[in-house]
Image: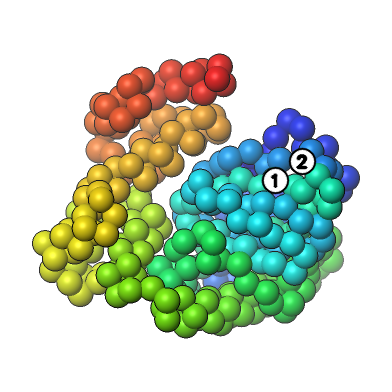
Amino acid sequence: MKKVANNLNPLFHINEYYGTNPLHIGSVELVQVGRLFCKSDTEIERHAHLGWYELTIVTGGAGTVEANGVEVSVSEGDIFISLPYDTHAIYSDAVRPLKYDFLSFYPCDDEKRAALESLSSAIYPADKRVVNNDKIGYLVATVTEEISSDAPDRIEIIENAISQIIIYLIRSMNGISAHNTQHVSDRDMLCFKIMNYIDTHMGLINNLSDLSNVTNYNYSYLSAIFKSQTGNTISEYYQQKRLGAARQLIIEGKLSINKIAEIFGYSSIYSFSKAFKAKYGIAPSKIKTQAHSI
């Protein structure tokens, strides 16, 4: 969910947000597109994404992008790639205020979606997700400008632009993948693949043993490798990630607790509440009050 801090004070802001009812354009579902010129005190509060990808294109200044608790410095020309179900925040530099465009989308094309999912494991660490591609920046700017216009052919232009954005994004991610795999062990890459699959399919996983089909490895082998490399079991990681994302959505307050439990695959509100209280020591209905009192 895109959330803007109270001290935002933007100089200029375009924000077309379609929330949980994305705008279907061609082979994508458009969730959000916009442009923000920050002031020195601008902060975009930590918020949880659902099942979409997001591009943050820095058009001026500098700042910090946070993904899943990891902070990454960005400056003009950088494009930060956010993955589905990331927890995300942005902070402007005090001296060089940040300017950026943003685009959130979900690919409906099976081939493109599979390519993005496959490459996401290679850019799983947040500090490996910055690319530089002027063509992507230009195309996102085009979408941002056209979405606010009333021109009769704007949807066609937007559809063509987003289609090209995804192609260039896949190329850029391929470049990161080729570089990263030279410096990461096979075991670490396998763990990144497991984590990425869990992170991007939190509401779709019926059984963790399905990871065997995704990785082509026996689940017992995967469990042993994951435990030795990360210190956690796969089940512990899965529970931690979906409860963490659920907690952030509850704090934001835009969805009901019942809806959040449904999104993350809990069979009932009772099972969700029980797991949530075991993790955080407090009922889901009370977490928002606690968070805002800190």
Residue name at image x 42 percent, y 29 percent: 257
Residue name at image x 21 percent, y 58 percent: 228
Quickly name the residue at label 1: 91
* Residue placed most toward the observer, 269 or 216: 216
Quickly name the residue at label 2: 42
Q: Quadrant of the N terminus?
A: top right
Could you say where residue 229 lies in the image, as x and y percent from the top left? 27, 59
How would you rate the neighbour count of disc 1 (Cα within 10 Å): few for under 14, some for 14-19, many for 20 or more? Answer: many
Quadrant in the picture for residue 141: bottom right
* Residue placed most toward the observer, 19 or 100: 100
Q: Secondary structure at mark 1?
A: strand
- Identify which amino acid the numbered label 1 is placed on: Tyr
Could you say where residue 53 lies in the image, as x and y percent from the top left? 54, 61
Q: Are marks 1 and 2 in contact (CB under 8 Å)?
A: yes
Residue 243, above or below 26: above
Of the numbered discs in the image, which one, if any, rests on residue 256? none
Residue 225, above or below 91: below
Could you say where residue 259 lies in the image, as x and y percent from the top left? 41, 36
